[in-house]
Image (cartoon, helix red, strand yellow):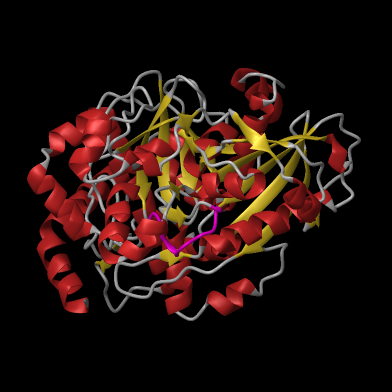
Amino acid sequence: MTQLSQHNAPAVYLGVDIGTSGCRTVAIDADGRTLAVGEASYPLHTPSPGWAEQDPNDWIAGAIATIASVAASGAFDPAAVRGIGIDGQSWSCVPVDEAGEVLANTPIWMDTRCQSICDELLAEIPAAEILALSGNRLSPSYSTAKVIWFARQHPEIYARTRWFLQSNSLIVLALTGVASQDHSQGYGLHFVDVATGTVDAAMARRLGIDPTRFPSPVEPTAIVGGLTRATAERVGLPEGTPVVAGGLDAACGTLGAGVYRPGQTQEQGGQAGGMSIALAAPVADERLILSRHVVPGSWLLQGGTVAGSASLAWLTKVIGEAERLAGIAASRSPFAEVSALAATSPRGAGGLIFLPYLSGERSPLWDADARGAFVGLTLGTTRADLYRAVLEGVAMSLRHNLEVAAAAGAEVTELLAIGGATRSPLWMQIKADITGVPLVVSAEDFATPLGAAMLAAIGTGAGTATDLVDRWVRRGSEYHPDPAATASYDHLYRTYAGLYPAMAEGMHQLAAFGR
């Protein structure tokens, strides 16, 4: 636990973030200042090719431990906590029984084991009908096929399952004893109408899913319940402390970056990369991801790159630098070290392009068998070139998503950036130059749990989204495209965009060989 500052705030709100690598809880006062932060990590399990799963009990343990940590920090009076909001990673499928006990590990958002199930469903139900209702294509990453996988592969677990829950709703259940499903996470289920947030029972039946195994959808700001006595004692907060439904981590991060008005766009530089464009009405495109925002009455058109900063972490590992970078003093972060080296490589990394498809790719390719690649390696390629190519390749994937969004009618005029990648000024400038769009870094280190805390504040009557963004969200460094750099990158991007179509068949053959 890290105590950041002391304030005798009249009200405190907690935001709990259930991420892929760990859980983080922040305590926020009524002026949007961070009082304390608690963190806990948990493992990712990859037992087979294409599988990526976690033990949801690890999420619960992380949430309990980090809430207790901030409550015991001494940075605020625990009795001042007015509400708790939870955000979580997308497309989970957590089976729990009547008692709320987790019955199995859950496939997470990067899991692609269900491709054959999707193929079967699409042979029976036109893809256009699924897209028209849910706003999203049928893909193995989403929750829909995972539910069917449990029914087919583990009928004994399926028979005992009362609810299939998302990551944040599991934590809400653990804290309050009440099962819930929020609107922003409904996009993982293709029988939920993305326009209205309601369940289409007829589509559920066509998909072979029992909709009664899912709680009725509620707004992310809705108070689901209060802390139970047992949980309150474990975390050191008053019994009955309100807990709101919470929502999708990308949507909470979008709100925490100040993005909620139509046209505003959040750029995510975490383990996964991507963008989220706020919309006043749903706009579906099969190449992108459409969800309801955590702000009622708005939607998000999203693009997701599976391996964003994860690509950089992978490179440091395979070239043997992970340990050295992990030991760098806090005054010089690994991002600063890598950026300094990458800056010595010229724009275009000496003619080297990186395709960041290290775990398949989501939008706009939707190819679980896409594979990462360095194209243009020579005997003269340096370590600095490799690093720069990774920074540029991830930025190219962002541009790819933005161009598809523009074709769908969602224009972007400014990127509001969050995530660990924002600690690299070089990477931020590369993204601005490659996309040709000005980029502003959020001054908040914890934009995603900040957004979750905002939901708690809104749900308990402390203000509207407009009020809280105005009071709580602060803008940081700004990066403007260099016209000469953008023109140069335009040529490189055309090469990048042509590589996947040219290499896809070979990638698929290699993926099959690896299996």
In the image, what residue occupies the spot 30% across and 67% down? 50
**Within the magenta stretch, is there residue 162?**
no
Residue 476 makes an appearance in the image: no
Residue 101, placed above or below residue 127? below
**Within the magenta stretch, is there residue 108?**
yes
Residue 444, placed above or below residue 333? above
Tell me residue 374's x, y (percent).
28, 67
Q: Is residue 433 left or right of residue 229?
A: left
Q: Quadrant of the N terminus?
A: bottom right
In the image, what residue occupies the spot 72% across and 22% down? 462
In the image, what residue occupies the spot 26% across and 50% down? 492
Tell me residue 35's x, y (percent).
80, 43
In the image, what residue occupies the spot 22% across and 39% down? 205
Residue 204, placed above or below residue 272? above
Residue 456, placed above or below residue 498? above
In this rendered view, identify the residue nearer to me: 58 or 343.
58
Tell me residue 395's x, y (percent).
38, 49
Residue 58 makes an appearance in the image: yes
In this rendered view, identify the residue nearer to me: 246 or 5.
246
Residue extent of the magenta highlight: 99-110
Chief SS of the magenta region: loop
Q: Quadrant of residue 157?
A: bottom left
Tell me residue 362's x, y (percent).
30, 51
Q: Is residue 512 left or right of residue 463?
A: left
Q: Is residue 138 left or right of residue 87?
A: left
Q: Is residue 465 left or right of residue 438?
A: right
Q: Quadrant of residue 312?
A: bottom left
